[in-house]
Image (cartoon, rainbow, N blue to C red):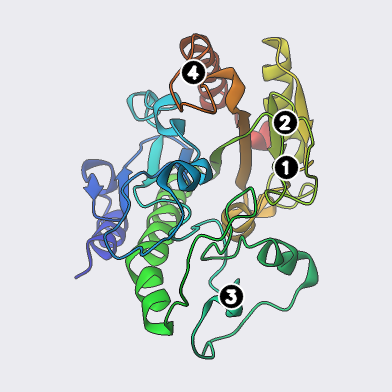
Amino acid sequence: MHPVLQLLSARAAGRWATIPFMSFAINAIAGRTPLVLDSPHSGVDYPDDFGHACDMPLLRTAEDTHVEKLYDFAPQLGAAWIEALFPRSYLDANRNTTEIDESLLDEPWPDPVETDPVVLAKVRLGKGLIWRLTDDGLPIYKRQLSVAEVQARIDRCWKPYHQAVRAAIDAAHDRHGYSIHLNCHSMPAVASSHATGNPGMVHADFVLGDREGTSTDPRLSRAVGEHLQGLGYGVSYNHPYKGVELVRRYGDPARHRHSLQIEVNRKLYMDEQTLELNEGFQPLKRDLRTLIERLLGLDPREL
């Protein structure tokens, strides 16, 4: 049985909280509270079969570097934690498997391909399931990829990651009757040319994305934003990041399943050129801990 399926079986048997899991693809730590955190873009284990052509420093700009360190206290507080170990530029777990950039392939893709023009805007920027371009618009490959190669990445990375996130949310909801899922990211201080549809935008300290209230009760999003504002941070809602596949797929506030994307500005905790942590890291981490503690004491059904 696949290890993630073992996790699912353990959850069903009521043994979820005792089983940690690590593979090539993910690190998953079980929780005991309604809170689930995941970091799909902080992975730094670059597979040997990547076959990229651009320099590693450029490739690493795709990472949400150090996000896993910002939240490493969360499992001690009883929150579930899921972390991608593979890099975002190898496969983006926050994209659907239909978000295929067919121009990267050496043969037709045999499975369904996204047709929604809003979703396809990111694919056109080179930011589909498999990235074609860096945030600065530079090609990642000097070759085309085979269908089998992409399918293998989906099987080894995308599927285990999503199975683990789903299992953690299901377990939290089963235990408590509701779940709060924080999809954890970081963003550059200023948007690059191919990062979003808003090149050059100066980002707020935090951007909270609930897909216009469809993945999280807006009252919960506001509670998070007001807590951060009370700590002195600037907060934007749903612009320029509304939340993508993970919160879309697992957020269902009508069933008390809340999924909120939280983007933190990298300037608050790291040097974006050297990737080194700066003096803001520890204060930010302390403030994020107060946010998690606030959420652990909050029942969204009572808002």
Q: State which quarter of the image contains the N terminus.
A: bottom left
Given residues 263 and 276, the one toward you in this image is 276
Q: Is residue 262 left or right of residue 64?
A: right
**Which residue type carries mark 3?**
Thr
Residue 28: image x %, image y %?
A: 32, 46
**Which residue type carries mark 1?**
Asp
Provide the residue designation for mark 3: 98
Q: Residues within 10 Å of mark 4 (few under 14, many from 20)?
A: some
Is residue 40 in view from this perspective? no
Please tell me whether residue 80 is drawn above or below residue 78 in the rendered image. below
The residues tagged by marks 4 and 2 sit, at their Cα atoms, a distance apart of: 21 Å
Between circles 1 and 3, the one closer to the viewer is: 3
Residue 88: image x %, image y %?
A: 47, 52
Provide the residue designation for mark 1: 217
Given residues 13 and 116, the one toward you in this image is 116
**Which residue type carries mark 2?**
Leu
Number of labels in the image equals 4
Between circles 4 and 3, the one closer to the viewer is: 3
Residue 22: image x %, image y %?
A: 23, 49
Between circles 1 and 4, the one closer to the viewer is: 4
